[in-house]
Image (cartoon, rainbow, N blue to C red):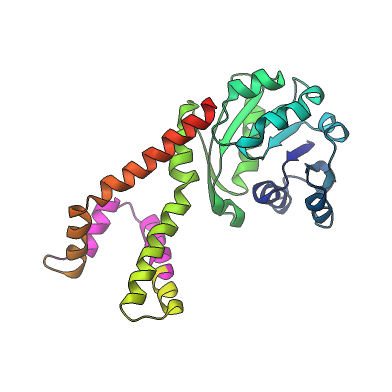
Amino acid sequence: MKTLIIGGGNMGITYAHSFIKAHLAEEKDLMILEKSDERAKLLSTQKVGSVYSNPGDCIEKADLIILAVKPQDTSVLFDAIREFIDPQQVILSIMAGVKMTSIAEELGVNKIIRAMPNLPAQIGMGMTVFTSTDDITRIELVTVQNLLNTTGKAIYVASEELIDAATAISGSGPAYVYYFMNAMMESAQSMGFSESEAELLVGQTFMGSVHLQKRHNYSCKEWIQKVSSRGGTTEAAMQVFNNKSLNEQVKAGTNAAHQRAIELGKN
């Protein structure tokens, strides 16, 4: 299967490397379309397949086309590639907020898969949520899911509305984690730890907590109870978090991200 990745940014290159590393694609079957001459020149020195700058030189060769550009660039992208698209090609879009109906109308295609990956995909620990139009065959869906799984975990959802929700939870989620980690690091330094010590304390705490949670079937609330003891230090922190309505503020933040994802789709 010939795969074309449109957009040679971080996510596009992550896919290229992941597909090759997992032996689901060979260099000869991979193509990258990059509009920046400087970026294209750099990519041509890496083992990520053939690099092109002209849509007419590569689009017609592809069975699968991955749209890995910023959603703000969709109008320019569609104008540049529309005349070269074949209705039988499978389109995989990772553009946040861009609806499948918009892609279908702009490119005249019906075989569309829409996915929302996240940043840890760069190290094979990503989370991707995806959906598809009814015209995608079972074989095509499984093929694309196998490709997405090379960057971590991927789950299929029947409703496209959940892609916007996934954008708010797993897509933007790493930033929420880093925000909380940064606050804890700053707190640790204010207590007397050095910057490097604070980073180690917080980083290892997050990593260990996640691994522990994955090894058992306890809920997060049950884990909080296991760490807390009556009248202890953890309970003191939890009381402040609850008094400050931190739980509700986190929900408000994710809801704001969700609404912004919906707005991007409308625009």
Q: Position of residue 17 (x, y in %)?
A: 71, 52
Q: In this rendering, is residue 199 above or below 133?
A: below
Q: Residue at x 42, y 70 (%)?
A: 204
State the predominant SS element of the stretch in magenta: helix
Q: Is residue 7 left or right of residue 153?
A: right
Residue 182 shows up from this direction: yes
Q: Is residue 61 left or right of residue 119?
A: right
Q: Is residue 136 visible?
A: no
Return the x and y of residue 114 as percentages of the image width and height. 59, 31
Identify whether 177 is placed above or below 140. below
Q: Residue at x 71, y 18 (%)?
A: 108
Quarter of the rendering containing residue 202: bottom left
- Percent x, y for residue 34? 78, 43
Identify which residue, 187 or 131, lies in the foreground: 187
User: Which image quarter is the C terminus in?
Assistant: top right
Instruction: Give yes or no for residue 222 being in the magenta stretch.
Output: yes
Q: Is residue 200 left or right of residue 17?
A: left
Q: Quadrant of the N terminus?
A: top right
Q: Position of residue 22 (x, y in %)?
A: 69, 51
Q: Residue furthest left?
A: 231
Q: Quadrant of residue 154?
A: top right
Span colored in magenta: 203-229
Q: Is residue 15 above or below residue 73?
A: below
Closer to us: 83 or 144: 83
Of residue 87 and residue 82, the one placed in the foreground of this image is 82
* Residue 117 located within the stretch drawn in magenta: no
Please name the residue shown 61% across and 22% down the image: 102
Q: How many marks?
A: 0
